[in-house]
Structures are given as C-alpha cells and as structure tokens.
Image: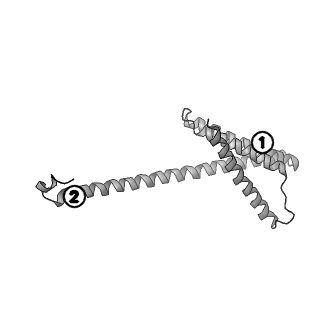
Amino acid sequence: MDWKKFIAEACILFTVLCVLILLINWIIAGTMEGFAVEPVWFFRVLLVSFVASLARRIRKIEKLPNWARLVIHALLIILGIFFILILPFSISRHYAVSTTLVLLLVLTMVYAALYAIARLFVHFSKKGADLKQQSRDRSDKKKSEKKNTDMPAYERQFRK
C-alpha cells in the first residue's frame, strides 16, 4: 500500500467533510455568530476519513472478486460512519435505539443510491466514449478511403 497516497486521500476527504459539516451547521443555525463545533467531532471526522481512504484502497485491489470489493467497501464506509459519527451522537443525545437503527438504514440507502448514481455515470460516460471512438474510427476510415480515391493509382504510389 502506498502510504503517501493513503494519507493524502484521507486528508483531502477530512478537509471536504469538515467544510461540509461547517456549512451544514451554518445553514441550520442561520448565522456564524456564537457558532462552535466540538473539537472531538473533528477527530471523529479524521477517523472516518482514514476508514474511507482504507475502503477506497481495498476497492482498488484487483485480486479480490468485484462483489467482495464492493461488500468490503460498503461495510467499511457504512459501519465506519455509523460507529464513529452516528452512534456517539445518538448516545450523547439519548436517542432511542430504534432511531439509531433507522439512521443506520437511511445511511445504507444513501450509500446504495450514491453507488447506483456513480455506476450510471460510469456506464454512460463509457458508452459516450465508445460512441465517440466509433465515430472517430468511421471518419478516419472515410478520410483514408477519400485519400485513396482522389488521385490516380500512378500518383498514389509516390504519396508519403
């Protein structure tokens, strides 16, 4: 495993998640005056970013079957977020167990929806790239045919 890339991905994800948390809290509160986030939440977000970076690295292992990579990635992401962020928050707010389990179910559905959107995006981008390549191949073929028929045979033999 390339540790530099692993840490760099975790740091980028940490920064993005922290900005999102601050923006969401700012939108909910409506003002930045008197706004504060507990420092322990930043450490939790850092842990989640390392778990997500690890999940991404496991997803790229080609020796594992595709279904195993997907299951491991999903479990790491969902359970990492659940145990590191949602469960401590639910315990500190004294939420009922049913509420916490509903949050786990919602998190799983969000993961599945984001995965489906990503797969559709990849599918259509590959399909579009294939269509562009086919179009290029056809135009190259037409150009080569045109070049070969524009001049008489005795001139074509001296063409570079």
Q: Where residue 77 appears, x then y in whole percent?
A: 69, 43
Residue 26 lies, in percent from the top left, at 78, 63
Residue 15: x percent and y percent? 71, 52
Left or right: 126 in relation to 16: left
Q: Residues within 10 Å of mark 1 (few under 14, many from 20)?
A: some
Residue in the foreground of this view, choosing between 46 and 121: 46
Q: Residues within 10 Å of mark 2 (few under 14, many from 20)?
A: few
Residue 137: horizontal and vertical position, in percent? 33, 53
Left or right of 64, for residue 25:
right
- Please give the residue where the numbered disc 2 appears in the rendered image: 147
Residue in the image at 77% along x and 58% along y: 22
Residue 118 appears in view:
yes
At numbered mark 1, what does the secondary structure look like: helix, strand or loop? Answer: helix
Q: For this view, does 64 lie left or right of residue 140?
A: right
The type of residue carrying mark 1 is Phe
Q: Mark 2 or mark 1: which comes first in sequence?
A: 1
Residue located 71% across and 42% down the image:
50
2 or 1: mark nearer the eye: 2
Labels 2 and 1 touching (C-beta < 8 A): no
Instruction: Pick the quarter of the image with the N terminus.
Output: top right
Q: Amino acid at mark 2?
A: Lys
Q: Secondary structure at mark 2?
A: helix
At x 71% / y 45%, what residue is drawn? 49
Q: Is residue 81 visible to the viewer in this orientation of the structure?
A: no
Task: Out of 10 and 70, give the one closest to the viewer.
Answer: 10
Q: CA distance from mark 2 to mark 1?
A: 66 Å
Q: How is the image coloured?
A: one colour
Numbered tag placed on residue 47 in the rendering:
none
Residue 62, image quadrant: top right
Badge 1 is on which residue? 83
